[in-house]
Amino acid sequence: MAVVTVLAACSGAEGAGSVPPVESRSVRPAVRSPTCTATSKLIPSCGAWWGIAPEVFTGAPVEQALHGAEARMGTAADVLHVYHRGSELFPTGAEIRLARDPERPRLLMINWKPSFEHTWADIAGGALDRRIDRLAAHLRRKFPERFFLTVHHEPENDVNPARGSGMQATDYAAMFRHVVLRLRERGVRNAVVVMTYMGAPNWAAKPWFEDLYPGDDVVDWVAMDPYADHRVQDFDGLVNKTRKEYPDWPGFYRWMQARFPGKPVMVAEWGVFERPHDRSFKRRFFESVSRQIKRYPQIKALLYFDSPQAPRGDTSFDSDQGADRAFAGLARDPYFRSTPVPRP
């Protein structure tokens, strides 16, 4: 889902009956295992990170949005997903405060689209080098901690395969490489780099799809952004979407397992849309995540896209009491609460 504004292995989920109603819910600290740690690439040794893009498209400042979302789900997020574009410097002061919270530190997943005016080929050719250098200087001064960085997420629907467009899949790969390598050359060594795909079979079936990948040397994690529309019934169907029109496509998780066997997988955005004629669907879907997540050991981070007005519908996790209880139970599942977030 394109956003251009503002913006693990332990035991099963708690039963829904143990989750208090949202109006009385407090943000409880997670109980972590002292034997579970994160690697230099922020891979948790136990379970998976639990994260959120909070209250997107509501206009709420990031601190208010995150604290509100955490109060609604009754627990703190491991990862805060934020969005930046163009010449914006990141992380912002508010994002740094949230990352450095002494009581509950959080990792940042920063989603950056460097430009909407320049083509990928322009950027690869150096058109934004001064912008990249300015960002590198800001990061060196303000934020030496490790953080996740994805560059122009979900590129598939921006590809223009015409010769000379500057927006071919190979141009994307060159742009991504140029941005990451220039940041590294300018001293930014703390960015854990994520390549984020849309996670949709129709784009994965394009002949240029494989050309998007910028290379193992500049990618630490691979990610997908799947959403539960009318064709998706549970978590299995979300992370391994298939369509009869594309019989050769195995599903994104299966493809990532085969294509990137040594890399952790992030579900960098996922959301469940309202079904007006099936009000219990969100609850059932969230319950399926707790049952099925351990089938996907390569998934090391799950970041929910929480928005009452996402482009294709309402993905807020507490749009009804049943969904709210199921999501709060999922958020407290020990599978997501075992590895401590590294402190600054």
Image (cartoon, rainbow, N blue to C red):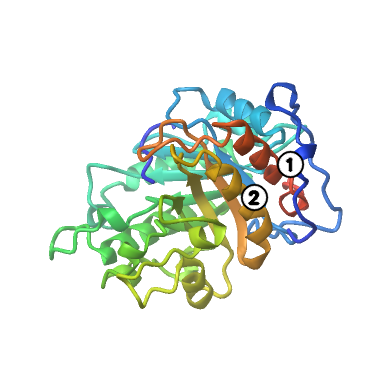
Residue 342, above or below 276: below
**Residue 254 placement (x, y as % from top left):** 50, 72
The residue under the point 51% across, 23% down is: 61
Q: Which amino acid does label 1 sit on?
A: Ala
What is the secondary structure assignment of the residue under circle 1? helix
Q: Name the residue under label 1.
A: 16
Q: Is residue 214 visible?
A: yes
Mark 2 touches mark 1? (CB < 8 Å) = yes
> Quick one: 208 or 323, which is closer to the camera?
323
**Residue 196 placement (x, y as % from top left):** 44, 56
Which one is earlier in the sequence, the residue at label 2 or at label 1?
Answer: 1
What is the secondary structure assignment of the residue under circle 2? helix
**Residue 142 placement (x, y as % from top left):** 57, 35
Q: Residue furthest right?
A: 34
Residue 287 got which mark?
2
Q: Residue 326 sits in which quadrant?
A: top right
Q: Is residue 187 visible?
A: no
Residue 257, above or below 70: below
Q: How crowded is mark 2: few (under 14 residues within 10 Å), some or many (20 or more)?
A: many
Residue 21, above or below 170: above
> Quick one: 36 or 293, which is closer to the camera?
293
